[in-house]
Image: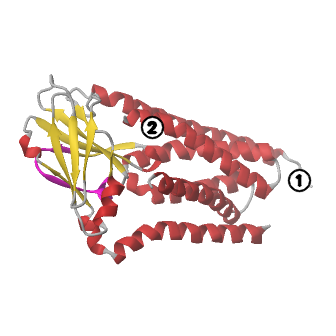
Amino acid sequence: MLINLIHSTWLVTFVLTVTIETGVLVLVIRERPWFVALIVLLLNLFTQPLATVVVTIWPTWFYLIELVVWLVEGIGLALLLEMSYRKGWLLALLANGLTTVLAVLWLWITSG
Amino acid sequence: MNTLIQRIALTLVVGLTVVVALPVQADVVEPLSYAENCIVITNLNDYPAYTFVISSIGPYGNGRVFENSVVQDECFSSGDLGADEATLQALPNDTTAATLTSQPFDISHTSSLSDTGKIDYYTVTLSDDELILTLTDSERTESVYGSEIYEPLYSNDFSNLLPGLMIIGVLIFIGIVGLVAIIILSIYLYRRRAHKPHP
């Protein structure tokens, strides 16, 4: 059961996260959309599998892990898109905040 | 543009704070509810040939085994389980016997009942080919049947853990691939910027 659950949910979560974060950042930045999409894909390729592993082992660390993911993705955006760290973290907060809120709302809705 | 981003970010911060603070607030208002928010498994002593294991479904929908080697009456806090659904497995101490698993039972259901000061009891009953959990409180009795027989999550030879470890390994590998790709892209961009003629 454990294996099937990881199998069935991770890829869906990954695709949804990348799609939503790319959409948000492209809408805000409005420059080089394909490059922004590539950056978002690579950053999530790095953060999301590792975050999933940690959440699987320590489920109650969900918010702490989201915080670390936000910090790391903010730094990544700042370095790769040539912007200040402040702006990178703001954009990462925008994108990750939205996906986190959606994830928490989804958990609320599905848990009744 | 910056002001717009800051406003949206502030809204998200407030939204996240509310989302995080709501459950915390519930605990502060009703401190006793946490202690009562508890699944009491009874009658386990009647089945000395079995080891009972609670597994639960947590954030991101991943399964997690929280308790093992439960051989007597136990109380599991749904807060400890950190999930809304759980299953109970009866693992036979004699490895030739079948492992019995309940259908998922709803922990949030017990939480809502315990908010009114009640405690739910899950009475465990084993039959030839299924494990039955009977929920009892002052208002109703429900039974959860688990006729499906799964492979045990824990076993002496650990062979059943291998698929799980493989998936965790694959996820870590994907993460490392992502990191390497980011580093390669960073080096490429750095070199391109370095070779760009300055105006």
Q: Position of residue A82 (x, y in %)?
A: 75, 55
Which of the chains bears the disc numbered 1?
Answer: B
> What kind of residue is marked 2?
Ile
Q: Which residue is pictured at 32% across the width and 75% down the height? A: B30
Answer left or right for A16 relative to B139.
Answer: right
What colouring method underlies this structural image? secondary structure
Magenta region, residue range: B68-81
The C terminus of chain A sits in image quarter: bottom left
Q: Which residue is mark 1?
A: B198
Task: Report the front residue among B127 and A7.
Answer: B127
- Any mark on residue B155, and which? none
Answer left or right for B163 relative to B183.
Answer: left
Which of the chains bears the disc numbered 2?
Answer: A
Q: Secondary structure at mark 1?
A: loop
Pointers 2 and 1 in contact (C-beta within 8 Å): no
> What kind of residue is marked 1?
His
Q: Is residue B73 magenta?
A: yes
Q: Where on the picture, by quarter, is residue A78? A: bottom right
- Any mark on residue A6, and which? 2
Residue projecting furthest to the front: B139
Q: Position of residue A45 (x, y in %)?
A: 59, 41
Q: Is residue B120 magenta?
A: no
Q: Is residue B162 above or below residue A94?
A: above
Q: Where on the picture, by quarter, is residue B160? A: top left
Q: Nearer the viewer, mark 2 or mark 1?
A: 2
Badge 1 density bin: few <14, some 14–19, many ≥20, Cα 10 Å: few
Task: Report the front residue among A50 and B51.
Answer: B51
